Image (tube, rainbow, N blue to C red):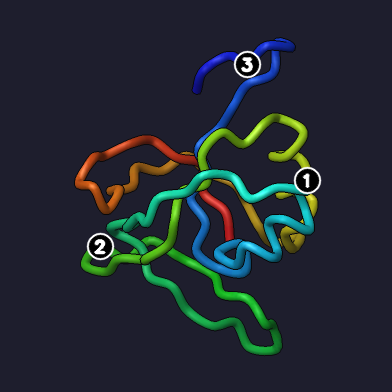
Amino acid sequence: MAAAAAGNQVHNVFVYGSLLADDVVRALSSRIPQSSPAILNGYHRFSIKGRVYPAILPVESKKVSGKVLHGITDPELYILDEFEDVEYERVTVDVSLMEWKRTRMEDFA
């Protein structure tokens, strides 16, 4: 994470569910940040009964496709956190960008 002008942090955020849709991200943050396709190894994506969004859990031999949103500000990160369900927990994970770089990301649904 690099420091931004007003003392805020900027974040790279891995998303794998409803936040894959540019329209959803734009509605929440009033912009579409740069993004990169990414893979989260060691996790499995699954449906939740009665919910319209997916969840992920650690499973050693599985992987989850998603993307990384680059340059997310602290206020935007707060908005993304508020958008998520009460069962959501943001964690830091290692993802593989499709350009074959590994980077540390914050995880979102």
Residue situated furthest bottom in the rendering? 50
Name the residue type under label 2. Glu
Q: Earlier in the sequence, mark 3 or mark 2?
A: 3
Q: In this picture, is 74 found above or below 95?
A: above
Find disc 2 in the rendering and name its residue.
60
Task: Give the CA distance from mark 1 to mark 2.
Answer: 31 Å
Q: Residues within 10 Å of mark 3 (few under 14, many from 20)?
A: few
Comparing 90 with 15, the one in front is 15
Comparing 62 with 1, the one in front is 1
Image location of residue 17, percent across then percent down: 56, 68
At a point 32% along the width and 58% down the height, the residue shown is: 39
Q: Quadrant of residue 58?
A: bottom left
Image location of residue 105, percent across then percent down: 45, 40
> Mark 1: which secondary structure?
helix
Query: Is residue 51 shown left or right of residue 12?
Result: right
Task: Give the CA distance from mark 3 to mark 2.
Answer: 36 Å
Q: Earlier in the sequence, mark 1 or mark 3?
A: 3
> Mark 2: which secondary structure?
strand
Name the residue type under label 1. Ile
Q: Quadrant of residue 65?
A: bottom left
Q: In this picture, is 77 found above or below 57?
A: above
Find disc 1 in the rendering and name its residue.
79
Residue mark closest to the camera, 1 vs 3: 3
Task: Give the CA distance from mark 1 to mark 3.
Answer: 18 Å
Q: Quadrant of the C terminus?
A: bottom right
> Mark 3: which secondary structure?
loop
Find disc 3 in the rendering and name its residue.
4
Query: Is residue 35 shown left or right of residue 29?
Result: left
